[in-house]
Amino acid sequence: MKNSFRPALLLAAGTLALASCKKDDDAAPLTSVTPVTPAQSKTVVSLSAAGTTSATGQPIPARHYTFYSLADGKEIAYTDSNSTKWDVGFRGTTILINGGTSGPGQGGGQLYSGLFADLKTAPTTGYAVDAAAGFALPTGSGKGWYTYDATTHLVSPIAGKVVALRTATGKYAKLEVQSYYKDAPATPSATTPSGYYTFRYIYQPSGTDLQ
Amino acid sequence: MLPLALLASPALAQRTGTPVPADTLRRQRLDEVVVTATRTEKSLTDVAIPVSVIGAKQLKSMGSLRLGDVLREQTGLSLVADHGQGIQMQGLNSEYTLLLVDGEPLIGRTAGTLDLTRVAVGNIQRVEVVKGPASALWGSDALAGVVNIITQKPQPGLRGSLRARYGTNQTADFSATLNAGGERAGFTLFGNRYSSAGYTLQPASGSATVPPFASYTGQSRLTYSLSERTKFSLSGRYFVENQRSSAPTLTEAGTTVAVDYQSRQTDFNLNPTLTHRFAGDKVFATARLYYSRYHTQEDYAYAADGSYYDATYFTQTFLRPEVQVDYRPRPNQTLTLGTGLRRETVAATRYDQRQLMQAAYGYAQYDWTPTARLNLVGGVRYDGPSQYAGQLSPKLAARYQLSSWLALRGSVGRGYRAPDFRQLYLNFSNPTVGYSVFGTNQVAAKVAQLAEQGQLATDPATGQAIIYQSALAQAGSLTTESSGATNIGFLLEPKLRNEALGYRLTVNAFRNDLSNLIETTTVALKKNGQSVFSYRNVTRAYTQGLELENSLRLPLGFTASAGYQYLIAKDKSVVAALEAGQVFRRDPATLQTERVRAGDYGGLFNRSRHAWNAKLFYESQPHGLTASVRAIYRGRYGFADSNANTILDADNEYVRGYLLLNVAASKTLGPWLSVQAGVDNLTNYTDSAYISTLAGRLLYASLSVELGKRPTAPR
């Protein structure tokens, strides 16, 4: 009789232990933990969106935009322009976002003033979409992401301007253009090949955390 | 007797002065008289506002040729090159300083700068520099201060002088003066030829920094005493400068052609003046008329065949009748009333038609010495409306003699600058680049005209021409630039027991608050991608600082002087943006963006935080010897923005500070012959990339002959 009690006692103790754990469970229900995908950050150096120059020295814009996917971190062929494979497109100083009149995606963009690291959470509203009346990122010196100095003939990305993006698939990202010249020289001159984007971005596949 | 004469009869500079003992450079001139501070004669040490005087002896000892050389060596003044050599005072640009010759303004400014190389130094009696806004007496443009060049007046006797000077860069200067003075009439004549082969700091560019030029100045004054109390004076001045150069020019097709450039500038002034001292010696009246005409013509032709490339001309005239009455009911009170009319016209290639600006003005000033120690001066001037609203400029200044060797002084006042012809009426389109600039008076009509002609870029969505309505509205309501300023300081002059010693220290702290400064703005976009510019009132800025000057008279004929200016000049909207953390810069090497701290902001471009000068003069009358050594230091100053945030915030945006060393010595070889030799910029300092006004080491030697009586120092 004594022998059969021990396992029962153990069982009772175990059940009690479990019951006490269960009490803790009741006090603070565990939330389901989904796996956190870290934000992807990347710096792209010297992505060509440049055109050519004619025999008389007149600049000719590139025939096609250069398309880029922030999610995949690579250039997308222009033949896929009518898809959601790309997020941003570059040609000369114009930047397209896959949405509205530019493409079938849900993309949108807005300009944020501050340091790249200061934009910690993506805004959920306020995105402009490329339209016939104007692009989400306005063109023209001083109106969008760059200024053009007529005396030095240099295009400079405005320091302190960060593009908050909604990608083609509705995810959030932030992007900062750092140089418009080939190989991002420290002191570009009027003759340095231009139209080569050096930019860094952080892409968040889920959520709005952009740190 | 002498001080009483100064107080009892306020008069203009034209009056022949009471003779003073033979002056030497080294003697502390306690009775030095200035006229620009109050438009009446007042002793330099008695004025309530900061005034500096550069006398004839010092001018001669410095060996300067043109006004720019003289002014750049003064404390608190910097020479800046922008469409000509201009002067910067209390951190304010050259368009904010009024330049006068015998109380009458010099006209003919290019983009606001009056080129100081137009003014010869050979017949200057003294230069008075008044700091602080003086619009209460002098009207427009006297925001930073006034520089008044007083020329030599006819002295009794017959004498003349000739001077020839030659130096580096084939710089040659020939001057002749003639003075004839009798009981009632006096006559002076001055002629000068100044020429140079110019210099090139960047030979690779193919064009000279300063092309060769030759200029002639003729000035004459006739004075006649109609009676004991009435005097008449007529003075005239004529200046002409010819310059030619050749420069490679980029054409529209992208090729380079050599283009020959030839320019001719003429400046003519005529100034009759009548003064009358009423019986009782309480009222003194002056009536004067001033006429000036400035004309410049520029012709460009292809070097290859001489065919026409471009030609422009610019003609400006100025007419001003004025009457001033000084009423002195008691020795310690002076009431000054003045009124006049300004009439200016301009006709030029870049203006549609001959434009006219006309305004009447009146000013009043009360100079009161209620106690022996306190002097108060209050003044106000009203300038009637022309193309801008009527301007009221008040000023108040006070001087308190704390003890026999210390005097305190302070002043507050308003200064203003009216929009000039260029900002109101310009109609210019650059043929090669394609942008247009229109004066605000007609910009709305011109933009509408361009829109009708289809020359403006159109918005693809709406089909409308791209016009920035808010900028256009601002251009349409252009108003005067103005400033409010405060100057506080003291004058210290201890009475030393040793007669051979003398010391004077002046300290002045200043603050100028500027508003509505005019700058260019884009009002519309053209089809060719270029902009249509006009002007609007935008900037709010301030300059503040401290200036001190001291001079020490030593035994054995030495005089030492030193001056220092500390200056901060900042744009108020930039300061506000910095404090809000909204200004950024990108490091060009790492491409990282960072926030600019308020402490990194260097202020407005082209202003040095520190500037000092130190001079040593020697004179030995028995040996007929004078010598001088002058050191002028200009601290580093901002040149241009290089990290795309439009403000001065990085070390590589500054021009290095520099020190200039000038030496000169002269010796009399006989009763009427003297020689002088000197070196300007002894260390041969140049900065070919950033400073176009430094030509390197300049050596010179001159010979001068004085005929007739050896001159005593006149007033």
Image (cartoon, coloured by chain):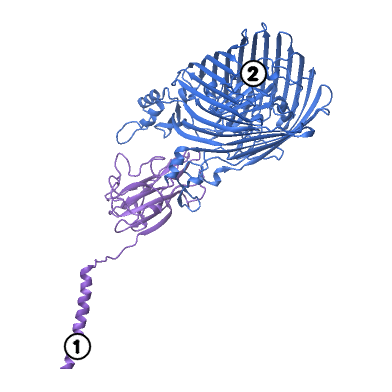
Chain colours: A purple, B blue
Which quarter of the picture shows residue B691? top right
Query: Which chain is mark 2 on?
Result: B
C-alpha span from label 1 to label 2: 125 Å
Circle number at residue A7: 1
Q: Is residue B258 left or right of residue A23?
A: right
Residue A28 locus on image (x, y percent): 23, 67
Give amino acid for label 1: Pro
Q: Residues within 10 Å of mark 2 (few under 14, many from 20)?
A: some
Secondary structure under the numbered disc 1 in the rendered image: helix
Residue A142 locus on image (x, y percent): 41, 40
Give amino acid for label 2: Leu
Secondary structure under the numbered disc 2 in the rendered image: helix
Residue B607 locus on image (x, y percent): 56, 37
Which quarter of the picture shows residue B84? top right
The quarter of the picture where the N terminus of chain A appears is bottom left
Image height check: is B636 above or below B454? below
Are circles 1 and 2 on residues that touch, CB within 8 Å?
A: no
Whether labels 1 and 2 share one chain: no
Circle number at residue B7: 2
The quarter of the picture where the C terminus of chain A appears is bottom left
